[in-house]
Amino acid sequence: MLLSQSCPPALPPAPEAGTDDRKNQDVSFSLNPKYQDNKMISTNIEKALNAQINAEFWSAYLYLSMSCRFASDNYKGIANWFKIQHREEMDHAYMMIDYLVRRGGKVTLEPIADVPAEWDSPQEAFADTLAHEEKVTSMINALYAAAEAEHDYATRQMLNWYVAEQVEEEDSVHDILDSLKRIGTDATGLYQFDLELAKRVYTAPKAE
Ligand SMILES: [Fe+2]
């Protein structure tokens, strides 16, 4: 088929100099009309979700710091594991942002606090990881309780994914810490452990 001369379509003619009055038009609109007209989330839950979004970004930053720490010691597998952990935490934040926007809430991105940069051993880093994940679990639980108290069933449903994810997170870090306990300071064991963690691959999360 021959393409007609109108394909691709011609651009509209540019306004003549001095005739473009778009600057004078009324452009009073909201970037998120839902936020003003149909906010489907309470201010309390909105604030709590924004705090959780910040915590997820902080977690991402923490794991990126751990990844860099072990990459510099040539523990490629451990660095890989934490880098994927970092990406997952970014996903957790993005998913919550998407939800908040869909509910007509306002996303407020606060500064991300500093994260530690030094760990003396893989054992220390994974022990910190478990402690951090346990803290995140309690934050998610508190959010869930707040949503329940307000009969906010949509937020509660969204949080179900995070509750299940925390079970996974804690379980996998427990397993890693058990392995590290058996390995102790055995260099060959640590080498094998590093090769094992190099196999971890990133998979995008599937929302419920
Ligand atoms: Fe997370």
Image: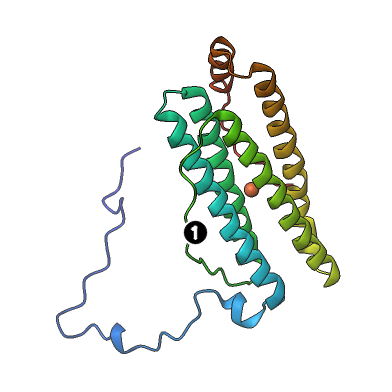
- Residue 203: x percent and y percent? 60, 34
- Residue 130: x percent and y percent? 67, 40
Q: For residue 43, what is the image quadrant? A: bottom right
Whether residue 161 is situated above or below residue 46 in the rendered picture: above
- Where disc 1 sits, the SS reads loop
At 61% across and 50% down in the image, what residue appears? 92
The one of 20 and 151 positioned closer to us in this rendering: 151
Whether residue 180 is situated above or below residue 97 in the rendered picture: above
Q: Which residue is mark 1?
A: 113
Whether residue 105 is situated above or below residue 127 in the rendered picture: below
Q: Residues within 10 Å of mark 1 (few under 14, many from 20)?
A: few
At 67% across and 27% down in the image, what residue appears? 176
The one of 141 and 178 positioned closer to us in this rendering: 178
Q: How is the image coloured?
A: rainbow
Q: For residue 97, what is the image quadrant? A: bottom right
Identify residue type, mark 1.
Ala
- Residue 162: x percent and y percent? 72, 49
Q: Is residue 141 shown to the viewer in this render?
A: yes
